[in-house]
Amino acid sequence: IVAVLDKPEGKFELKEYRVPDPAPGTILLKQELTGICGTDIHMYHGRLPGITYPICLGHEFVGTIAALGKGVTTDYLGKLVKEGDRVIVTPGVGCGKCYWCLIAKTPTTCEEAFGYGFFSDGDTHYHFTGGFAKYMYCHHPGTAFFKTELPPEVAVLMEPVTVGMHAVIRSNIKLGDTAVIQGSGAVGLSTQVLAKLAGAAKVIHVGGPTDYRIKMAKEFGADITINVSEIKAPEERIQIVKDNTIKGMGADVVFECTGVPAAVPEG
């Protein structure tokens, strides 16, 4: 069974297809959980260019191996795998051969790249290509998947957490730095945790707008929280940050995790 969105702001239809036998070098998963990303919402409303409908959404997923294609014996890190093992999958797949994949190390810019959860269900060859389905057919031999002992409720968070991890790695954050996190969603909270682990001595969280999100930010280790629904003027929020940094110089690193253009100049 696959939940297929027929068109932007359309209806989800449950379709039945024959469960495929995995080809050599591929795997078939039995789905356990799938997250709903902000990108899924954009695609539902037809706001992501290049997307073809009908489509099976869902790129944050975790499942157990239902069948292994010939030649598949280990995961991406070389761990032995078998049917029944729980795995998490990197949704984006590049060709693994071009300049962008091998030299630039940016497979998302590969001309032949695609992503699970972004694949049209109108294709006649592959149907189980998104997390909103009972099975997931990882049909590209270059798919990176990882065996995990984590419970599915935790493992399903792998994709959004890696967004925060990538940001922290690129930031070159140093031990003792003060970091500002803008945004209280999954990416913002993940980035906050990882910034702490990377050495941030003080984390100032600017987010909200609900009290529950601010409460989550505190539970995830924020030293200072600023609720945008209470402190509405950007100038006032900036001053609070300066008042809580050495000599009023502001943060060493700012992570913009809202997707709201107005947050950029404030940071």
Image (cartoon, rainbow, N blue to C red):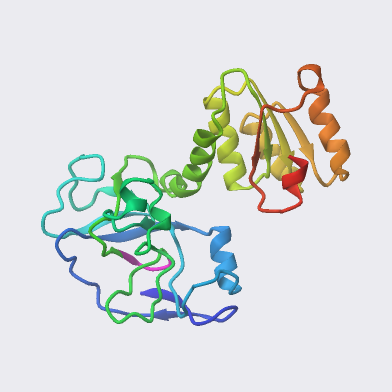
Using the image, determine if residue 11 lies above or below residue 62.
below
Dominant SS of magenta comes to loop
Quarter placement of the C terminus: top right
Can see residue 97?
yes
Residue 257 x, y percent position in the rendering: 63, 46
> Who is closer to the viewer here, 72 or 47?
47
Residue 92 x, y percent position in the rendering: 39, 56
Q: Which residues are magenta?
A: 132-136
**Residue 33 figure quarter:** bottom left
Residue 187 x, y percent position in the rendering: 57, 45
**Residue 27 figure quarter:** bottom left
**Point 14% across, 48% down: residue:** 73
228 left or right, relative to 136: right
> Who is closer to the viewer here, 53 or 80?
53
Quarter placement of the N terminus: bottom left
**Point 52% across, 26% down: residue:** 197
Residue 105 lies within the magenta run: no
